[in-house]
Image (tube, grey):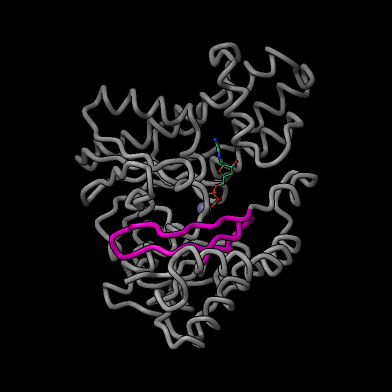
């Protein structure tokens, strides 16, 4: 079964063709960084318009490289969480295409899609997929959480951020330091040349599996207020110290979750899993603790259509599909422990949603 996956939840227009074993035939991603850069963050209205302009060509290329329309057996689209206007573009496009071609259609939760990214098999890249179950740390621009993953139909939430997501912390820190958007990759690059021990920054909420990054952001803001934005080596040192604080918290909690749940497999996913500091630190800790670590290549960590296509294939194989009336939802319904189970069933029921997305 070959599935066309479409992703438009934030600032990347993605489309890909993937089969139900995770083989990636095509994966096209059009980023909008240059449009949002001047604002230091994603502007929802600009994102929706850009998706609208790009969705046609992006899907056309993914389909062509993926073997043509005849080769597509189903359509999967990110349904939420994300920016509602942006989600609506992909969802409407995907529904229209599936309806026109008479294909099965399924709405996919963006977070669930991230969790199964390690199973993608990209040409020329080694696949390192874990056996089920595993512990997953999902760290992206919108979400930071730890899950116990048993399969597409059972995903248990163990901890999550109470304020900012890890990627958001990187983005806000970069904005504060005048480094542009998105902040993660720039800080990653500068941190590689800096001394992580130079500045002392807090590691908040170490006692819990939940996360809180707003205090760290405030500490950085206070440092900049007191000393100004540094340059050269000092800027690298500040980036390295900031990155080290985020990474230490993420790795400590993810490995603690493994210990608490007696799990020996850990997966890192989401845009922040592309961070070199995080990858290196997690590798060292996992080796020391006898935990098997799985981190997909950076292209599978940041938003892409391939992970949506594969999660869609798993849902369809499990007999789940969506009606034409599915609507985008802005927030993760899994804000309470255990609730994410509903996500894996093709999106939450309307009654579990608050706000505009329902
Ligand atoms: O998963 P993703 O592409 O989109 C969301 O679902 O949010 O994650 C985007 C986030 C951004 O906050 C970006 O700054 C961060 O991932 N990111 C990184 C790196 N690459 C992307 N953070 C740290 N280091 C990186 N190399
Ligand atoms: Zn994402």
Image-based side of 135 in relation to 355, left or right:
left
User: Residue 289 magenta-drawn?
Assistant: no
Looking at the picture, how far across and down is residue 269, in whole percent?
42, 45
Q: In this view of the protein, which residue sits in the foreground, 269 or 67?
A: 67
Is residue 97 in view from this perspective? yes
Residue 195, placed above or below residue 11? above
- Towards the viewer: 293 or 98: 98
Count of residue discs = 0
Name the magenta segment's main secondary structure. strand
Q: Nearer the viewer, residue 223 or 207?
A: 223
User: Split into 4 quadrants, where in the image is the C terminus?
Assistant: bottom right
Figure quadrant of residue 255: top left
- Residue 278, located in which quarter of the rendered image? top left
Instruction: Tell me what residue is drawn at x 73 percent, y 66 percent.
Output: 49
**Which residues are drawn in magenta?**
6-30
For the point 38% across and 52% down, the residue is 117
Q: Is residue 23 magenta?
A: yes
In the foreground, 230 or 257: 230
Q: Picture coordinates of residue 279 (x, y %)? A: 42, 31
Which quadrant of the rendered structure holds the N terminus?
bottom left
Report x, y in % for residue 213: 56, 37
Residue 239 vs 11, above or below: the answer is: above
Q: Can you give x and y, in whole percent of width and height, for residue 251 in the image? A: 39, 31
Residue at screen point 76% across, 31% down: 178
Q: Is residue 338 above or below residue 118?
A: below
Residue 161, can we see it? Answer: no
User: Residue at position x 42%, y 78% from top?
Assistant: 70
């Amino acid at each position: 079964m070959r599935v066309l996956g479409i992703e438009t939840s934030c600032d990347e227009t993605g489309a890909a063709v993937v089969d139900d074993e995770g083989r990636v035939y095509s994966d096209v991603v059009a980023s909008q960084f240059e449009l949002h850069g001047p604002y230091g963050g994603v502007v929802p209205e600009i994102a929706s318009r850009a998706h609208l302009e790009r969705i046609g060509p992006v899907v056309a290329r993914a389909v062509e490289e993926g073997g043509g329309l005849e080769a597509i057996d189903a359509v999967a689209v990110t349904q939420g969480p994300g920016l509602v206007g942006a989600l609506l573009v992909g969802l409407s496009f995907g529904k229209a295409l599936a309806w026109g071609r008479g294909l099965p259609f399924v709405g996919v939760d963006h977070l669930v899609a991230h969790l199964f990214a390690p199973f993608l098999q990209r040409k020329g890249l080694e696949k390192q997929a874990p056996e089920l179950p595993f512990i997953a740390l999902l760290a992206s621009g919108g979400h930071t959480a730890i899950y116990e993953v048993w399969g597409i139909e059972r995903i248990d939430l163990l901890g999550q951020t109470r304020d900012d997501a890890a990627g958001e912390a990187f983005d806000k820190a970069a904005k504060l330091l005048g480094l542009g958007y998105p902040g993660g990759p720039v800080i990653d690059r500068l941190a590689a040349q800096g001394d992580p021990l130079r500045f002392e920054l807090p590691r908040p909420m170490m006692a819990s599996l939940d996360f809180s990054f707003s205090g760290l952001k405030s500490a950085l803001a206070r440092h900049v207020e007191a000393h100004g934005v540094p340059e050269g080596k000092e800027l690298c040192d500040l980036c390295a110290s900031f990155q080290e604080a985020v990474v230490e918290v993420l790795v400590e909690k993810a490995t603690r979750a493994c210990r608490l749940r007696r799990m020996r497999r850990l997966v890192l996913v989401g845009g922040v899993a592309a961070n070199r500091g995080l990858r290196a630190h997690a590798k060292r800790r996992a080796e020391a603790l006898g935990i098997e670590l799985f981190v997909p290549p950076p292209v599978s960590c940041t938003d892409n259509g391939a992970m949506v296509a594969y999660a869609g294939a798993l849902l369809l194989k499990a007999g789940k599909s969506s009606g034409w009336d599915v609507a985008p939802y802005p927030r993760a319904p899994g804000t309470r422990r255990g609730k994410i189970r509903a996500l894996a069933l093709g999106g939450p029921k309307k009654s579990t949603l608050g706000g505009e997305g329902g």
